[in-house]
Amino acid sequence: MGSTMIEKIIGRNVKRDVRPGDIVTVNVDRVMIHDIFIPFVADKFEEMGFQKLWEPDRVVLIYDHLVPASQVDDTRHFRVGNEFAGKHGMTHIHRSDGICHQLMTEAGYVKPGDIVFGTDSHTTTYGCVGAFSSGIGYTEMAGILGTGQLWVRVPETIKVTVTGTLPDNVTSKDVILTLIGDLGADGATYKALEFHGDTIENMSVASRMTMSNMAVEAGAKCALFEADEKTAEYCEMTLGEAEKSLAADADASYVREITYRAEEMVPVLACPSQVDKIRPVSELEGTPVDQVFIGSCTNGRLEDLMAAAAILKGKKVAPFVKLIVTPASRKIFNEAIENGTMQTLVEAGAIVTHPGCGLCCGRTGGILTDGERVVATNNRNFLGRMGTSKVEIYLASPKTAAATAIAGRITI
């Protein structure tokens, strides 16, 4: 019997064949800590009695959730992070360069076949380049910092195949939302999602990122895309036999298989206040909105901003509607300026913020209040996520979001 991608990645790391349910100790290739968790990681690291990091160059510290500071205590996180990094010789530190999950692949920290952990649930994002990546807590992170290792249970795998050509108004965000709706918020708990089909092959790495990012909303431990030439170009590398060998075998065993025809897919929304409460946009057309948000680690990449700009070009945001745009990184921000995308968004009436997590995580940059409704491109719509518990959050693709901003109501 053949092996799935996750079985091959873990097996290569531990140097033996593995099967779902096996508990193994892996050697970690890279870790990411963001500003919210660094004080807790530092305290636990000291409490465990460690004196030094196992390999400082494998640790990445990113300030993205709390910048710029919006509460007095935020600065404590910066101070503790700086002190910890200085004490232990950390060199990979990003202060306001962008969102952690964008930077980890954009800056070349993650490669196909790597095993990576981060102190954020959306660390599953790096599966877009064929890496096993998953979110962990600060105690587990402290343990890795001291030892370079972590035990994991080998996940079962759900195979998802998408074939055909997506309609013009349907994006990878609609694909992953549809899948989450079909699986349910716990339908992939501690399982790997493995994506296949010519629709997937034709997607950019950025589009794949959107899907791997949101896999955790169905409970997935990781979400994996086979590394191909697009991956190689994005990662600025040549795929060797080692990377190519990580593709799933034709006779691999899956706990479940799901197949979609791309032509049958439609634009969808995740409705308040569950990510798996999915409905076609057509069923909600005409619902008035107060705000539209385009950004986050889910849909703040250049292709997302360009897709929105193409719809907004020559038009204006509806009166009394706020359109907030947040690029996922400084690099993306600059690229959007250079190719005219940002100018188009601004001319349409967009409010542009610095690259970061602010509004998505409910800290800064457009927090809403009771009775307001927002259509957003981020990954979660839980109660109180972007303001008070009486804010209604709908999750959508950048195309749906842009069209909604012009109309002032949900539309496509």
Image (cartoon, rainbow, N blue to C red):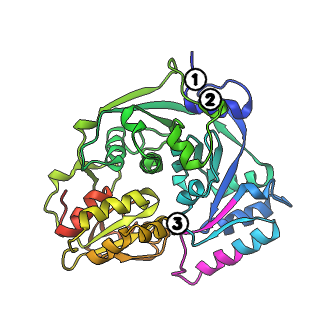
The segment highlighted magenta reads: 60-80
Residue type at mark 2? Lys
Horizontally, residue 379 falls left or right of residue 48, namely left
Q: Earlier in the sequence, mark 2 or mark 1?
A: 1
Q: Does the magenta stretch include residue 68?
A: yes
Residue denoted by label 2: 8
User: Contact, CB < 8 Å: mark 2 with mark 1?
Assistant: yes
- The local crowd at label 2, few if under 14, some if 14 to 19, many if 20 or more residues have their Cα within 10 Å, is many
Query: Helix, strand or loop at disc 1?
Result: loop
Marks 2 and 1 sit apart, C-alpha to C-alpha, by 6 Å
Give me the disc on residue 3.
1
- Give the residue drawn at x 30%, y 65%: 309
Residue 215 vertical placement versus 89 (above, below):
above
Residue type at mark 3 is Lys
| Residue tagged 3 | 331
Q: Quadrant of the C terminus?
A: bottom left
Q: Position of residue 21 (x, y in %)?
A: 60, 29
x%, y% of residue 180?
36, 43
Mark toward the start of the polypeptide (3 vs 2): 2
